[in-house]
Amino acid sequence: MTEILPKYSLYKLSAVFVIILSGILMPASSNGQTKDIAPAVTKAVIDSDATELVKYFNEKVNLSIPGSDGLFSKEQAEVILENFFAKNKVTSFKINHKGGSGEGSLYYIGVLSTKERKYTTYFLLRVIQGKQVIQQLQMEAD
């Protein structure tokens, strides 16, 4: 009697199949675990809520708004944004464009309208340690 595949070969084949299947399914499931924070960011901006907005910042954030430009801690960024929102009453915020990179970063470009003027607003989201965070926020007066 001829055995087509010895027992140990079947074991190795099943182990290889499990490894391949895990490799196919894991990237999809890990992407599904990342919560999209863009709607929450948009709401925080509309509400002029600096405290809520910085919850979504990376530990250090590149912030560029009128009067401030640089790399700031969350705490520093919160103070800067509180001052900005106190001087600029937000009337609306609309995202006009969304894009991404091959590395998984997402960017959003929109218009922030205040009582005084409009600002072209850009924010960059990255996934760091499985969590989506704001890496960069820019507001430029039109």
Image (cartoon, grey):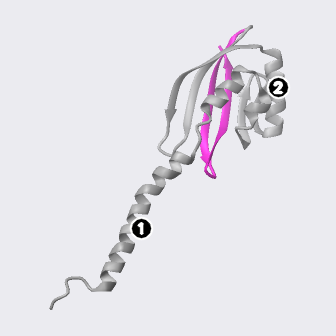
- Name the residue that disc number 1 marks: 19
Quadrant for the N terminus in the image = bottom left
Q: What range is drawn magenta here?
A: 117-142
93 and 62: which is toward the camera: 93
Prevailing secondary structure class for the magenta stretch in the rendered image: strand
Find residue 133 and report its image quarter: top right
**Residue found at the far bottom of this picture:** 1
**Percent x, y for residue 37?**
62, 35
Residue 11 placement, left or right of 115: left
Please check the rendered image and state whether residue 55 is part of the magenta-colored stretch, yes or no.
no
Residue 15 placement, left or right of 38: left
**Percent x, y for residue 118?**
67, 12
Task: Tell whether label 1 touches label 2 (CB within 8 Å).
Answer: no
36 and 73: which is toward the camera: 36
- Name the residue that disc number 2 marks: 82
> Which residue is rendered at x = 47% and y = 53% of the image?
27
Label at residue 91: none
- Per the model, the C-alpha gap separating discs 2 and 1 is 50 Å
> Which residue is rendered at x = 67% and y = 20% of the image?
140
Badge 1 crowding class, 10 Å Cα cut-off, few under 14, some 14 to 19, many 20 or more, is few
Quadrant for the C terminus in the image = top right
Find residue 24 and report its image quarter: bottom left
In the figure, 75 relative to 110: above or below? below
Badge 2 crowding class, 10 Å Cα cut-off, few under 14, some 14 to 19, many 20 or more, is some
In the figure, 96 relative to 137: above or below? above
Element at badge 2? Answer: helix
